[in-house]
Amino acid sequence: MKKIQMVDLQGQYFKIKADVDNAVLNVMESSAFINGPEVKDFQTELEDYLNVKHVIPCANGTDALQIALMALDLKEGDEIITADFTFAATVEVIQLLKLKSVLVDVEYDTFTIDPEKIRAAITPRTRAIIPVHIFGQCANMDEILQIAKDHNLYVIEDNAQAIGAEYTFKNGETKKSGTMGTIGTTSFFPSKNLGCYGDGGALFTNDDDLAHRLRGIVNHGMYQRYYHDEVGVNSRLDSIQAAVLRKKLPHLDDYNEARRKAADYYDRAFGDHADILIPTRAENSTHVFHQYTLRILNGRRNELQAFLAENEIPAMIYYPVALRNQKAYFQDSKPEDFVNTDKLLDQVISLPMHTELDEEQLKYITDKVLQFMAL
Ligand SMILES: *Cc1c(COP(=O)(O)O)cnc(C)c1O
């Protein structure tokens, strides 16, 4: 059996090696390392894939979130509502810009931000909501967009984990994740569903004026060369990464399908177990399984992780600490307001999930999990 890894980037690379190697060598020969044609072409191809008017490439997914907030003319102390149960980047950039993060609980079933909790957290200083499409599935965008409309708020979708997922609104309309709010952001970190071979990221919007603004901010606030109209940043996707992404984008749907197949296998193995809850698949969102995350109900999650490690199966706890209890982002809170987040911190475990899992590995992993649960 192949060694089991949390993410098998090497296996995926070898399948497209000739194609990618060629593309990277071409960039080196052209020596258009920054803002070359590869970046522009990738931008257009991603716009077509997502069916969105503007893609603005940038250096990574954290920058994308920061740049999105910078483009919205927010003032110090303005409040941004986001989920307590997510990767830290989302809240980090809020604080970096001297805005106030307001963390709220998530739904127990989908792990995504709870719309009722958003409503309850709105104050006269609330300016934006950042739903995170965590683990590969969209948050409840029907509700979130309605709340945003009712209170005149911006919506920034943190789509770092869900590129390629589709959301179907109650009225039947279907859109790609990241293209529903004011701005969508993503990351091309190597292990993401669409990963490059270094750092990369992008912003999406259908708003022409905002797109212009974002393009300026990523480039030192320059709208005309050497005229700096506002304080921006230097955040670029480089041509080598763009060349890699151009070769991988055509495979994205197949990659997500391979993840879904692995998830189906896991679901069949664990679906009936009394002490295991499999990931909930929301009715209105496809799931692209950035992570495959179980909830272990017998209180032995950490022991399960250790048992799997002894059997050479990596498994991760995403996320072990609530953001509101992190030293850097501490938010005074009542435990009764975060019942779901706190339960999830104790129960979740993410199993190996990537495009290269084969049946032999999946059988071994599921057998070992079930063996432990029967002990
Ligand atoms: C990965 C990730 C980010 C940050 O992306 P980087 O490219 O690593 O900066 C932001 N938000 C979420 C939810 C992520 O998973």
Image: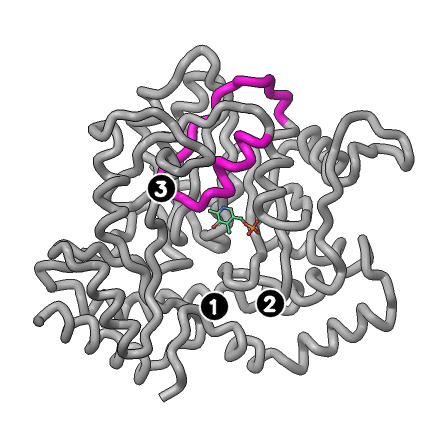
The first of marks 3 and 1 along the sequence is 3
**Is the residue marked 3 within 8 Å of ligand 1, measured from its CB?**
no
Question: Residue reaching furthest front?
Answer: 327
The residue at the point 28 percent across, 47 percent down is: 283
Q: Mark 3 is on which residue type? A: Phe
Mark nearest the camera among 3 and 1 is 3
Is the shortest distance between ligand 1 and the CB of mark 2 under 8 Å?
Answer: no
The type of residue carrying mark 2 is: Lys
Q: Quick one: SS at disc 3?
A: loop
Residue 90, percent across and down?
A: 49, 39
Residues under labels 2 and 3: Cα distance?
29 Å
The answer to which quarter of the image holds residue 309 is bottom left
Q: Tell me if the residue at label 1 has its CB under 8 Å from ligand 1.
A: no
Residue 81 inside the magenta-drawn segment? yes
Other residues around mark 3 within 10 Å, as few (<14) / some (14–19) / many (≥20): many
Determine whether the residue tagged by mark 2 lies in a helix, strand or loop.
helix
Query: In this image, 94 relative to 151: left or right?
Result: right
Q: Secondary structure at mark 1?
A: helix
Instruction: Characterize the local packing of mark 1: few (<14), some (14-19) or many (20 or more) Cα atoms within 10 angstroms.
Output: many
Label at residue 248:
2
Report the magenta residues as a range: 72-96
Q: Earlier in the sequence, mark 2 or mark 1?
A: 2
The answer to whether residue 39 is visible is yes
Q: Which residue is mark 1?
A: 255
Q: Is residue 219 magenta?
A: no
- Name which residue lies at 62% across and 42% down: 63
The residue wearing badge 3 is 85
